[in-house]
Image (spheres, rainbow, N blue to C red):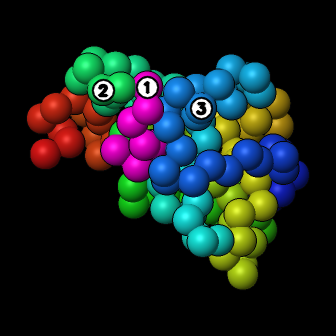
Amino acid sequence: MRVSDCMTRDVKVIAPDTPIREAARIMARNDLGALPVGDNDRLVGMVTDRDIVVRALSDGKSPDTPVREVMSEGICYCFEDENLEHVVSNMGEQQIRRLPVMSRNKRLVGIVSLGDMASGKAQRQVGAALGEITQEGGRHSQSAEARH
C-alpha cells in the first residue's frame, strides 16, 4: 500500500505571516489539527493547534502573532509513492503523528496521519508507531528544554 492510497488530498496552506488567530479559525472551520505553512510555493513549516496553545498562549503572545513565531520548522515529509509501512515506521521513530505528502516534484499534494493509516493494512505498524510517539521527549517535544 502506498501513502497516496490513504492520504487526505484537500490541504489548506497558510502563509508564515498569517496571524495565529486566523490559523485557529481555519482549523476550527475545517476540523483540522495542523496546517502546512507555505512561502512562495515552498513548505516552510507546520503549525498545530497545540503549537498555538503551548508556544503562543502559554507565552502570552497576542492573537495577532504571526504563525512563523510558533510553527515547527525543519519539517519531515514523505512522498506520495512511498510504501506506507516504511512511512509509518519513520513516523514512530521521529515521534510525528502527521506528515505533509509531497510529489516527486516537491509539490504538496496531501497530508497523511496515523488516523488515516489506521483504517488500512498498516494497523499493526500504526500501533507500534503510536507507542513510540507517545514516549516522552524526542525531537519534536514542545517543552522549553527540548526547543533550545
Q: Say if residue 117 shows up in the picture.
A: yes
User: Which residues are the magenta region?
Assistant: 63-69
Asked if the stretch drawn in magenta spans residue 141, the answer is: no
For the point 26% across and 20% down, the residue is 60
Which mark sits nearer the N-terminus, 1 or 3?
3
Is residue 143 depicted above or below 107 in this figure?
above
Q: Say if residue 130 shows up in the picture.
A: no
Which mark sits nearer the N-terminus, 2 or 3?
3
For the point 59% across and 32% down, the residue is 22
Q: Amino acid at mark 3?
A: Glu
Is residue 105 depicted above or below 98 in this figure?
below
Q: CA distance from mark 2 to mark 1?
A: 7 Å
User: Is 126 situated left or right of 5 in this image?
Assistant: left
User: Which residue is tagged 3?
Assistant: 22
Q: Secondary structure at mark 2?
A: loop
Q: Position of residue 85 (x, y in %)?
A: 66, 52
Looking at the rendered structure, which numbered label has been put on residue 63?
1
User: Which residue is tagged 2?
Assistant: 61
Looking at the picture, tell me which residue is in the foreground, 63 or 34.
Answer: 63
Q: Secondary structure at mark 1?
A: loop
